[in-house]
Image: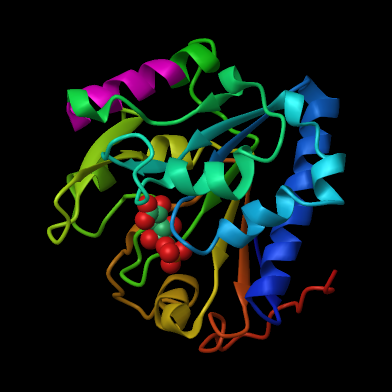
Amino acid sequence: MTAITIHHDAELLSKAAAAFFAERARLALADHGRFSVLLAGGSTPRRTYELLAQKPLAEQIPWHACHFFWGDERCLPDGDERRNETMVRRALLDHVHVPPEHIHPITRCEEGAEQAAMLYAAELKEFFEGQPPCFDLIVLGLGEDGHTASLLPASTALHEKVRWTAVARRPEEDFSRVTLTIPVLNSGKCTLFLVSGRSKAKVVRRILEPCSGESTLPARLIRPQWGELLWFLDEEAAGLLKAQRMASPEL
Ligand code: 6PG
């Protein structure tokens, strides 16, 4: 099931995403005693993370039962401003009481991206007790080129069907990336894209209303096997969509 809701602006999109996160955390705790979430990097989700760290949500979310993973990471030294881990810690994790052992960043990149990818796959295997990863919530962003996580157009990682992690690299960057792969990203119980801004309108239309013969952009490969697929867009990002979508009841 794919659902698209359009929010007036980035702030209301972030508020809706934060409220949704909190609700999913409560449901997961009630259902199986923990909430596993895969976080996106980039700039769009930062405000959502900040709102989670503020009242009232910060007091409502069962932080003790939350387990945080990342959908991708830039292979840079711990604490580097460009790391997705750094952004999430500053926006959220430094302000709420998540047990440190429940925070699973992609690290040890200094040993090489391939090694970091292998180690993260092992960490996923341990957390999911040998079963394929099945996150309660997967949060994804969308690049203007249609990438998500670090599954970049034309990258070999896009076609990985077995391994849960892979190495990626953008030609313009002087560092590698580790990304989770399609098998993991399509195995979540709920996958939530957060996309805002006019600069994303074209790629949003290419993904949600593709022309025939449209090249398959990485984000179009996100088709959860059984979970929900939700798109939270602001009006700017949704600006080129033809179909009328359910306007979200603003919180
Ligand atoms: C990354 C992110 C990436 C991001 C998109 C959108 O490490 O860059 O994981 O997949 O979600 O590039 O980024 P913005 O939200 O900054 O537009």
Q: Which picture quadrant has residue 232? A: bottom right
Residue 116 is inside the magenta segment? yes
Q: Residue at x 83, y 36 (%)?
A: 26
Q: Which picture quadrant has residue 77? A: top left
User: Which one is in front, 95 or 141?
Assistant: 95
Q: Is residue 113 left or right of residue 124?
A: left
In the picture, the quarter occupied by the C terminus is bottom right
What colour scheme was applied to this rendering of the protein?
rainbow
Residue 1 visible in the displayed image: no
Secondary structure mostly seen in magenta is helix
Q: Residue at x 31, y 50 (%)?
A: 151
Q: Position of residue 195 (x, y in %)?
A: 53, 68
- Count the marks: 0
Determine whether 39 is above or below 132 in the image. Answer: below
Q: Position of residue 143 (x, y in %)?
A: 38, 66
Magenta stretch, residue numbers: 112-123
User: Which one is in front, 88 or 39?
Assistant: 88
In the picture, the quarter occupied by the N terminus is bottom right
Q: Residue at x 45, y 41 (%)?
A: 85
Residue 238 is inside the magenta segment? no
Q: Which picture quadrant has residue 234? A: bottom right
Image quadrant of ligand 1?
bottom left
Q: Is residue 222 left or right of residue 4?
A: left
Q: Position of residue 56 (x, y in %)?
A: 87, 51
Q: Position of residue 43 (x, y in %)?
A: 48, 62
Q: Residue at x 57, y 62 (%)?
A: 194
